[in-house]
Image (cartoon, helix red, strand yellow):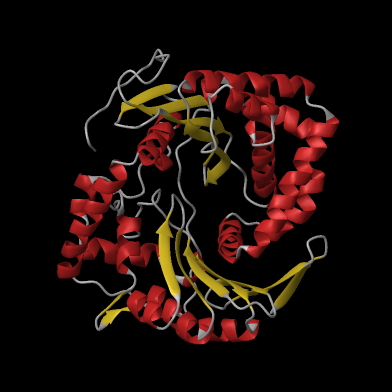
């Protein structure tokens, strides 16, 4: 195994690329009582292509995630939980991950997790039953204002990119999914060369690698690159209102960015995006505090930088009696900072972001998921320690000037009738349940 060290962070990790193509990362933490492990697959809601030709219905990646713990004699999820592990899975736009944390019996749990992703089991009967479960899940999330406004925001930003489609699918697509389709989807994406195993805790790295070698298939197959249609940098629809029974108007503001490149350059873009967003309206920024005092924002406000292959965007979201004023204030503040960001404020924000990233290394789940995302984008997440010092005030000013433009923005609002003080010119009321 290769030992990679990161002196600036005081961290190290072991890396091995198995003969079958699977990547394995182990971050040693001697003396820690809890261990975390995840297997991530390089596919998600944006992936529908099938090796045999044609496309899977929207929501297939998420549906398959629901079924991967099934066994002929029961459920691996239930077995691991009964043995003391905390087990879960998620599907995002471009990644599906299966994971657990435990305080003992780690080798046993790891074997079960690897067997789970290596040997699927589903029948037409179990798929039909799961269809009802996922339709109920769709009904629940469709009633959540946050889910609705986030989906509308992405559809406002993107016209071609599949990230605009909900990961869960819709009623029509979910009902089309069959056991045969799940099998085709599994065979297209679930092979070792398209997976990564990440572990953090007091474990033996060599034992982790040995277990993976023993359980996973041995044939090697290289991943197929995604074919994505080119997107314009302007948003498709800049304002959308969805009518919902909420106590206060809620909003999601998206800003469309150039797609991030692979490699360290992509990680650097992500760090720069987070830094720029924090400078504009982070909790310690003058703008956030002014909007908070004016009652236009509250503690539910959040922001972030997001990316998937072929797409990247900033988000700002929360509650506000006047989302349009908040949007305009964010764009105006970014424009002012693009021209007049001072060195002291830049350095304070840079140190704060770096410190937050370092503190995040103690959250084993975030660390492992970040390592997995990095592997699929051809960078090592722990390189952030050397990249932060390379960010300059000129980089931030240039980013602010390019990214925070009205034509790149999409504002999605959920509100009850009469709640919003100002109606946007492209207002679209949608009170129908999806």
Question: Of 266 and 133, which appears nearest the observer?
Answer: 133
**Quick check: 169 above or below 235?**
below
Give me the residue at 42% from left, 81% from top: 112
Quadrant of the drawing holding the N terminus:
bottom right
Is residue 380 at all visible to an observer of this figure?
no
In this picture, residue 392 sits left or right of residue 55: right
In this picture, residue 40 sits left or right of residue 347: left
Image quadrant assignment for residue 117: bottom left
**Quick check: 273 above or below 8?**
above
Give me the residue at 36% from left, 24% from top: 241
**Quick check: 313 above or below 330?**
below
Q: Position of residue 211 (x, y in %)?
A: 53, 85
Q: Position of residue 154 (x, y in %)?
A: 43, 35
Image quadrant assignment for residue 401: top right
Q: Position of residue 128 (x, y in %)?
A: 16, 62
Give me the residue at 40% from left, 39% from top: 146
Q: How many marks?
A: 0
Q: Position of residue 10 (x, y in %)?
A: 79, 66
Image quadrant assignment for residue 79: bottom left
In this picture, residue 427 sits left or right of residue 29: left
Question: Of 323 and 21, which appears nearest the observer?
Answer: 323
Question: Of 414 and 192, which appears nearest the observer?
Answer: 414
Give me the residue at 30% from left, 59% from top: 63
Quadrant of the drawing holding the C terminus:
top left
Is residue 1 at all visible to an observer of this figure?
yes
């Amino acid at each position: 195994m290769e030992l990679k060290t990161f002196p600036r962070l005081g961290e190290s990790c072991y890396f091995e690329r198995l003969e079958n193509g699977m990547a394995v990362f182990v971050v040693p933490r001697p003396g820690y009582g809890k261990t975390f492990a995840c297997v991530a697959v390089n596919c998600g809601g944006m992936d529908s292509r099938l090796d045999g030709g044609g496309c899977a219905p929207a929501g297939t990646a998420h549906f398959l995630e629901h079924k991967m713990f099934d066994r002929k004699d029961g459920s691996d999820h239930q077995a691991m939980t009964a043995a003391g592990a905390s087990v879960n899975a998620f599907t995002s736009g471009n990644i599906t991950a299966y994971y657990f944390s435990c305080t003992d019996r780690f080798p046993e749990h790891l074997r079960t997790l690897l067997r789970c992703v290596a040997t699927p089991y589903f029948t037409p009967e179990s798929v039909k039953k799961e269809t009802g479960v996922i339709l109920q899940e769709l009904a629940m999330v469709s009633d959540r204002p946050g889910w609705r406004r986030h989906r509308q925001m992405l559809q406002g930003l993107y016209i071609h990119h599949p990230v605009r489609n909900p990961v869960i699918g819709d009623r029509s697509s979910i009902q089309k999914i069959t056991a045969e389709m799940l099998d085709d989807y599994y065979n297209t994406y679930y092979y070792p060369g398209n997976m990564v195993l990440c572990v953090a805790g007091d474990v033996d790295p060599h034992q982790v690698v040995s277990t993976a070698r023993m359980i996973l298939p041995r044939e090697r197959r290289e991943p197929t690159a995604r074919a994505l249609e080119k997107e314009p940098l302007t948003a498709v629809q800049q304002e959308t209102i969805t009518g919902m029974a909420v106590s206060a108007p809620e909003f999601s503001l998206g800003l469309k960015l150039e797609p991030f490149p692979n490699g360290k350059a992509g990680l650097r873009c992500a760090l720069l995006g987070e830094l720029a967003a924090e400078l504009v309206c982070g909790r310690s920024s003058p703008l956030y505090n002014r909007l908070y005092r004016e009652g236009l924002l509250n503690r539910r406000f959040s922001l972030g930088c997001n990316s998937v292959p072929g797409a990247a965007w900033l988000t700002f979201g929360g509650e506000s009696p006047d989302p349009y004023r908040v949007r305009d204030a964010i764009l105006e503040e970014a424009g002012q900072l693009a021209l007049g960001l001072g060195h002291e404020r830049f350095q304070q924000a840079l140190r704060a972001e770096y410190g937050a990233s370092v503190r995040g290394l103690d959250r084993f789940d975030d660390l492992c998921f970040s390592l997995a995302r990095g592997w699929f984008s051809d960078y090592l997440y722990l390189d952030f320690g050397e990249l932060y010092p390379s960010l300059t005030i000129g980089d931030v000013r240039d980013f602010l000037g390019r990214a925070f433009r009205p034509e790149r923005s999409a504002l999605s609002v959920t509100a009850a009738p009469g709640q919003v003080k100002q109606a946007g010119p492209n207002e679209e009321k949608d009170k129908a349940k999806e």
